[in-house]
Each structure stands twice: as C-alpha cells, then as structure tokens.
Image: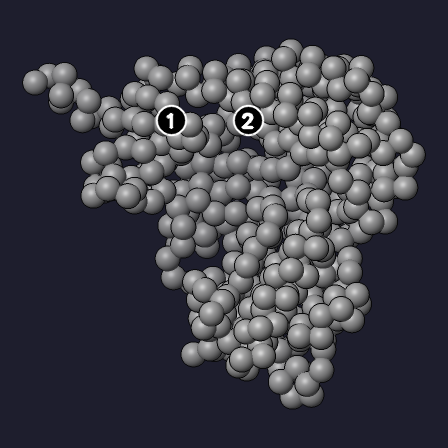
Amino acid sequence: MKKLFIKTYGCQMNVYDSARMAELLAPIGFCSSATPDDADMIILNTCHIREKAAEKLYSELGRLKKLKDERKLTIAVAGCVAQAEGQEIMARAPQVDIVVGPQSYHRLPEMIARTARCGGQTLETEFPVLEKFDALPKGEGPGSTSAFLTVQEGCDKFCSFCVVPYTRGPEYSRPVAQIEEEAARLVARGARELTLLGQNVNAYRGEGPDSKMWSLAKLLGRLANIDGLARLRYMTSHPRDMSDDLIAAHHDLVQLMPYLHLPVQSGSNRILKAMNRGHSVDDYRRLVDRIRTTRPDIALSSDFIVGFPGESDVDFAATLALVRDVGFAQAYSFKYSRRPGTPAAAAHKQIPDDVKEERLRKLQLVLGEQRAAFDAASVGRVIDVLFEKPGRRARQAIGRTPYLQPVHVENAAAYIGEVRPVHIDAVFPNSLKGTLVSARQEAIDH
C-alpha cells in the first residue's frame, strides 16, 4: 500500500473534500498517513479566503521540496488556491506534480496515472460539478459520529471581498435523491449528526423526487426521517436566503439544532453596501427577531470583517453596536485582507494594518465576553449531549451540546454515539464540564 497524507486548510467544505479525496484514492492503493514524512503522496487542500493564503502555500511547498529531493514523492495542490492560481503554482513550484481545483478532484486517479506515465505537471481546474458528484465514491466501513455532507457549492452573490464565486463557481445544488442516499449511508456507518454544507447553503434549490425544485427546508424535512439520525445542522447561510419555510423548520424539526451561523460582516449600512451584501443592518435585525420569535432558544453565530476599505470609526462603532444589540453565542472575526481579483482589492482608502489590528482587538473583546456569558449560562442546566469521542482520561468522553459547545464528562465512554442528558457543572476557557444525569442522581440518592 502507498501512503497518502492530506493537509487541509480552511473551511468545513475542505474537510469534506479531503475525506472524499482519501476515499477516492483508496481503491488505487493509497492508505492514509498521519505524517508527511513517510508519505508517497502529499495533497495540500488549500483555502483562498484568509490572508496570505498563497504565501503559506509556497512556504509549505518549500519544505516539501526537501522531502522530494530525498525520495520519490508525488505532490498535489488542491482547493481554492489551486483553482485561482494554478498556472502560477506550476511555474513557481516545479516540485508540484498535480494542481487540481475543488470541482475536479474526482479526476485525481486519472491525473496520478497520467503523471506516472508521462511525467511533468498536470493541471485540472474546470468546473464539471455534475460530473464530480456523480463520480464520488461510496464510503464503506465505520465513520464518525458527526459528519459533513456537501449539498450545495458555489455562490452567485459576488460580495466584493470574496473569491468564492471565482474559485468555486456558480451555485449548484445536488439532487435530493443523491443527498438522501449519501446521508443514509453516513448514518448506517455511525453518524448521528449531519451538518449540511454549502458556500451559500440556504440558497439550496435541488431537484426533488417529484422533479420539482426543493428548498433547504424541504430537504431537511426529508433527511429528518432517516432512522438513527439524531441531529441536523447547516452552514454557511446568507441573510438574504433565510426563507419563511427555513425559519419555520427551526420550530418544526426536532432534529434541527437551535444553533444558526448567520454572517452579517458589518454593522454599517455604508460598508454593507460597499461589500455588496444586498441587505441592510435593519434587515438583519428584523431577521434575527423573526428567527428568535420562531425558536426562542436559538443561539446565533456570525462572521465579521473589520478594516474593510473606507471603514471609518463611525462605521466600526456601528458594528460594535450591532454586536451588543444582537448578542452572539459565538462569532468569527477577521481583519480585511485583499483577495486578488475581487473588487474590494482595488478599492481606495485601504485601512492601515495597525488600525485593523486595534479594531479587531476591540471587537474580539466584546465577542469574547458574549461567548463567556453564553457558556456561563449553561452551568446548572441539564442539556442533551451527543458523545463523539473518548477523552484523555479513562472512561471519559467528549460530546457537544446542541450549541456546539464541547463537554467533558466522566464515566461516559460507553455512550459514544449516543445522546444523553448531562448536568453542566462548570465552564472552562474552551469547553464545559458535566455529569451524566443518571450518575448525578445516584450520587444525590446516596
């Protein structure tokens, strides 16, 4: 058997893609390796969203060149940087054998064979999405308790800061039957929780078994009927695509967790317009009110960008005001970074880095306080926890609440793969500590 090492950068969809690449290459003799040091093939599955993505790639490729100089090794670059900068990667890094975009990785076996047969470099960055999903392997054997499932790819929103429309292509939704089949297979392999993925997942419009276009809400309702599936989630959503039936699904579907990632990016209408987000701050506030009215126990997560070109102190203050008004259980915040080819990269009034750093610090302070308050409010409550893996200590298990909070519980290893009520006893910086309700009751009784 040949050994395969995949290094994954970025989002959950890249995690999903990396797992599928590993499954795709298993039939041609590749088994997974935990380290690049003894691998016969290394795949760098890249993300183009964050700052200095290309620089990090070339730095990693420099380290891998030393390995390749010492022994026979196939190096592949996959993902969004590959899609955006494929020709440049091949020119700057001759040690790279294969460059493959996120819509073409199903062609990896063919590309590996071509490279072995003919030598040289192989590039594939087309957008054959239909062909890609038709070609995905059907995984077998045990899987994880929580699994990702891509249902939609690409984006048509064209936010002025974002490269996704250029690297992942236009929006495409997989047919319901194909998704349902993969979901059932994942559950049969042990998954109790599925997270449906898409660059703009709530824009899902896939062909249903009745030949009509189904919404994400209708798809969720269908998947909720799979025996053994305890939890459903979806991400990432756009505020403009939170439809009435999707909001209602948070009330109607027991399996749909009360946790929603709903990026807003800024609290300033002026900046939202410059970002081409297509919604106002008041639109977002009203949407949050509707969602919370429908599902009062829902927790919200979001994304924020500080230092967008032209952002003033007043604009940033509006973002802080929105954060304080809405209240988030969790949020991701970043300094604006130029992405080549996007409209914002050429915008005037780029913000100095020291200003961006200070604004990010202030924002993360408020967001951190909100997260700490949300976690602290869990103490003393009994919350259902899905146990996912063993802890560090004997018989300890780690699970997650409906709000994605990790929980460490003693004497729970026997319940991995199950949902059990847990009394939350304490909060740590990055997790909660709890006790199984049955064990706690026994201690009280004695």
The answer to whether 243 appears left or right of 445 in the picture is: right
x, y (%) of residue 23? 50, 65
Label of residue 428 in the image: 1
Picture mark count: 2
- Does 268 sit above or below residue 34? above
Q: Position of residue 264 (x, y in %)?
A: 71, 26
Number of the label disc, if any, that sits on residue 330:
2
Disc 1 crowd rating (10 Å Cα; few below 14, some 14-19, many 20+) is few
Q: Which mark is residue 193?
A: none
Q: Position of 26 compared to 288: left or right?
A: left
- Residue at 44% across / 21% down in the picture? 375
252 horizontally vs 263: left or right: left
2 and 1 marks in contact (CB < 8 Å): no
Identified at 65% across, 88% down, the residue is 117
Give the Cα distance between marks 2 and 1: 15 Å
The N terminus - image quarter: bottom left
Assign a secondary structure to mark 2: strand
- Inspect the image, locate mark 2, and give the three-letter code of the amino acid beneath it: Gln
Instruction: Please tell me whether residue 123 is drawn above or below residue 320 in the rendered image.
Output: below
The one of 338 and 30 positioned closer to us in this rendering: 338
Q: Can residue 29 be seen in this view?
A: yes
Mark yes or no: residue 213 visible.
no
**Quadrant of the image occupied by residue 342:** top right
The kind of residue tagged 1 is Phe
